[in-house]
Image (cartoon, helix red, strand yellow):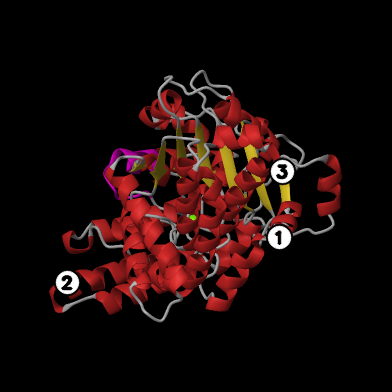
Amino acid sequence: MFKTTDPEIAVSHTGEPDTFAYTTALKRWVPIINSIATDVQSSATAKDSESASKIVESLNRLKECVVNNAPVEPLQESTEIGSQYNEEMEQLRVKYGTLEWRNGPWLFTECLLYRKIHFFFAEHAEWKDYDPFRATKRRAFESSIENALKLTDGFFLSLKPFESQSFEDLHNADPEKNKELFIEVMLLSLWGNGSDLSLMPNATDEDLQRVQAKRSLEASLKRIVDNDFDELYASLRLSAPKNGQYKQIDIVLDNSGFELYSDMLLAVYLIESKLVDQVTLHPKDIPWFVSDTLPADIVELIDMLDIAVANSSLDVKLCEAGKRLSALLKSYLKDDKLKIKKHSFWTTAHPIGRIFQYGQDLANYFYDTSDLVIFKGDLNYRKLTYDGKWARTVTFKEAIGPLATDDKRFPILSLRTCKADVCVGLSEDRALELSKEPEWTYDGSYAVVSFNAV
Ligand SMILES: [Mg+2]
């Protein structure tokens, strides 16, 4: 029986004009389905062309359903996750009286879209593990690799103090400097979240670079509408290791490419500063929301870095920085300082507060071992806050429901650039000021750094 502990709140709905949910379903879904079909057609070989045609047929049927706003149909996938989607679908149909592609809760219908697409591939042995977004993800990272390396050069300079001091020592010697450095690295990972390909299906290199240039410290702090850096910094510095042995931070990833690269820099900083002993990355288990990270993307990013630094046209300094980063990441992976943990909970349509029902092993793992779970990006934020139509001044703590109250709760940080309707945690003044910009939560110009200690 389907169980939910969701807070009582209306949620973003694709059938409501003047919302981001409505525009997304109307304008983005069809081009994404088209681009997948194009990718399959161009990747098919003589050996798998028959199954490729069947996948394209299924994609075209799905596209027709979206275009014609047809009622959603159950998943054919006979897995536990498939049953959970179908059970919730029935509940939603009863609740709303109808459930159509562009007239239903946005979080559920959008997750369902990607889950259905996954099944079209999973049905055919030759395509079972195929990632239709891989080429797009690779191209995007290739175009930003030089900028990423420039960043890495400066990043390693800022790590210099940690060659002789730990995070704790530097804090005791120069708290302001230590905190500033901590915030800078966090901001890098935060604004790295700007590069989301599912929102920019036609982005040029220039668009991507503009997004990546938003990092300047002062300007970017002004654009953080819920900023818990002070509380977060104090909590990390003071909290004792859970098992008295080591400290661990988990990063629930969003996009691959430049964002993943910035998350890797965050991991390097956390480990090199000796703030933690171990970082665990949580990618998706199936291709998801175009640019989301799969385990293979993590390996591929290091490979692409190696290839780039072997290219003699790059500046020597940049090559050195890239080689150093690649060597560090490989050694962390070998020594288990950096781990990759895959879990199917992340590709359900469940808000994250349902982890205590539908991802119990994962919830226990966070509760037992993690000192902080960082959730990257917009989809994770929508899932943390139930994609609810909360007042802007509702606190993050309230909006995450059982994640703040369950006996097995764990510390949570959301690093998210705003690209949806939901956003909470604002002061009265900020909410009033931004209410004059009706679409301020849509384009990634603003962000949140929302923290909930246990
Ligand atoms: Mg994403």
* On screen, residue 163 above or below 19: above
The tag on residue 48 is 2
Q: Which residue type does callout 3 highlight?
A: Asp
Where residue 271 appears, as percent x and y from the top left, is 45, 41
Quarter of the image for residue 11 reads top right
Query: Secondary structure under badge 3?
Result: strand
The residue carrying pointer 2 sits among few (fewer than 14), some (14 to 19) or many (20 or more) residues within 10 Å by Cα, namely some
Q: CA distance from mark 1 to mark 2?
A: 43 Å
The residue singled out by tag 3 in the image is 226
Judge whether residue 275 is colored magenta: no
The tag on residue 214 is none
Q: Which residue type does callout 2 highlight?
A: Asp
* On screen, residue 395 above or below 405: below
Q: Is residue 216 left or right of residue 269?
A: right
Mark found first going from the N terminus, 1 or 2: 1
* On screen, residue 436 above or below 48: above
The residue singled out by tag 1 in the image is 18
